[in-house]
Image (cartoon, rainbow, N blue to C red):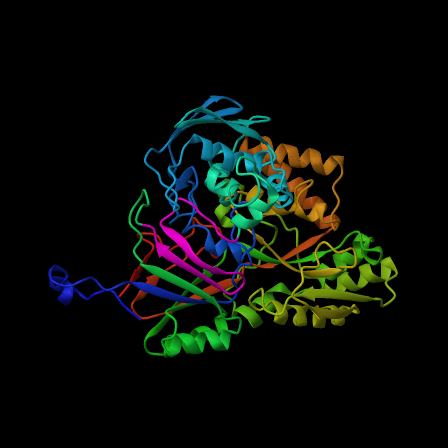
Amino acid sequence: MNRLLTATALTALLVAPAFATDLTVAAANVSSYLDPGRDHSNVGSQFYFNTFDPLIHKDYSTAEAKWMPGLATGWKLIDDTTMELTLRQGVTFQNGEAMTADDVVFSLNRMYQATFAPYQVRSRDRLDNFSGAEKVDEYTVRIKTKRAEPLWETLLNLQQVFIIPEDYTKGLTGDPKVAEDSDYEAFSLAPVGTGPYTVSEFVPGQKIVWTRFDGFWGDKAPLDTVTVTRVPEIASRLTALKTGEVDMITNVAPDQLALIESEPGMHAVGSATALFHVMIMNMNHPKLKDARIRQAMSLAIDRDALNEALWLGKAVVPSTHTMEEFGALYMPELQTFGYDPEKAKALLAEAGYDGFEITFDTAPGYYTNGLLAAQAIQEMWAAVGIKGRINVDEKWSGNSPDMMARNWSNPMYFADPFGSFGVMWAPGGPSESEGRFNTDEAYKASWDRFRYSSDIETRRAAYAELMDRIQKDPPVLPLYRPYESWAMRTGVTWVPQAGHIPYVLDFRAGSITVE
């Protein structure tokens, strides 16, 4: 495996070719497709930032919103519902095409005016206020919203509106002048963007290879190639790192950190990830329509005990669905979720619970410690009289009417309650559209005030109303912010950056060094 030259060898650059700088990563999971518009999974989120760009970048070293030029060099509001952006000139896609306003309008409208079903889902849960984009000239576009938008820059920085090439995408299948569903399916297997690395090889679910794109408009990528391979077992990932087969591994649980730090030539970095592992409950399942049953399911779970047992106390257990990164909208004073086994028993008795079995679905390895948490929750349920059974299956069951409870995650897609709770639990969002959550006019009214007000106190009051509703008729329990770690060999310096959505493998200039 080739490495960067040491300082003592720099003079050799004058007389000899430079060595390549390569990185190999063993990941717990690899995506089955690569399309930033349709994806919002924890696995997929790892892989887009190296290949694609947004119109508006930001300082990714901090969760604070410090906006920076991206594929747009400037932007201004024309009126309350119109933003005009000046595009960066000289940008080239990785297939050699020049980026113009046509590509930007195409990329945005594929989401804002979505016809492809997976795009419609993502459009509905975070981009519903955007009506469309239009070209003014070759390097100017205007974006229209349905009503005044308080989060313009935030929502133009999202992964889902990264820019892709129009002609390339339309030409993948069928009529080259028409964007067809088959084009988007094909794009997800052969993606092209404007970022510093080209996807040069992709084996769905198994392997991704990035190669430096020398035509990138920004700072040159520091690595020649990056190879990410799926290695689902943590023991196998650790062995590969120890033997030098790989340079870096993902999804390391806290109980492995002491081992890593005791090994020469290895080190780890980690943090309480800006994401909640949650338990969701199907309020429309015939057995769980009584809110008292779901309240009892929630109150029976000692989340502090889960933190100590699974995360060595390094995770963060929330009082409500809130994170410090929300800034002025961080609201830990709300006591939405708690542990009270005696109250759980009383609620079960009031509801006439007769001992019917409640299933808890989990994938075997998608979430770090996910199966262990499910097993512990089953024991906690048993302690208050709930009969539980764990279903282990790779298949997502959140859209099944038979699902009763399961694990899921609520990432912070951007630093605002809308970017975490809102994306998942908005009226018409993923939870309601999959049939396990219901909203009514009162909920929608609170949501509307929270989502569209430009006044912080109005938003805080409306969010408190939403949390009160969640407490009384619970569809979700945030378990904790997991403490996720990455391990790497000595000589590789990399840390997850607070300004990214969780799990992003950012290998751009300034984000990683390899010796």
Q: Residue at x 55, y 30 (%)?
A: 455
Q: Decide if residue 371 is on the left or right side of residue 243.
A: right
Counting from the top left corner in percent of width and height, residue 222 is at 29, 56
The number of numbered badges drawn on the structure is: 0
Q: Could you tell me if residue 38 is visible in this image?
A: no
The quarter in which the C terminus is drawn is: bottom left
Q: Decide if residue 390 is on the left or right side of residue 127.
A: right
Q: Quadrant of residue 479?
A: bottom right
Q: In this picture, is 409 found above or below 5?
A: above
Q: Residue at x 50, y 63 (%)?
A: 483
Q: Quadrant of residue 297?
A: bottom right
Residue stretch rendered in magenta on the structure: 189-213
Q: Is residue 460 magenta?
A: no
Q: Residue at x 59, y 41 (%)?
A: 180
Residue at the front extreme, as displayed: 175
Counting from the top left corner in percent of width and height, residue 295 is at 75, 56
Q: In this picture, is 432 found above or below 273?
A: above
Q: Could you tell me if residue 187 is visible in this image?
A: yes
Q: Nearer the viewer, residue 108 or 150?
A: 108
The quarter in which the N terminus is drawn is: bottom left
Q: In this picture, is 460 found above or below 282?
A: above
Counting from the top left corner in percent of width and height, residue 178 is at 56, 36
Q: Residue at x 45, y 27 (%)?
A: 141
Q: Is residue 194 magenta?
A: yes
Q: In this picture, is 304 found above or below 78?
A: below
Q: Nearer the viewer, residue 181 or 353?
A: 181
Q: Nearer the viewer, residue 282 or 29?
A: 29
Counting from the top left corner in percent of width and height, residue 454 is at 54, 30
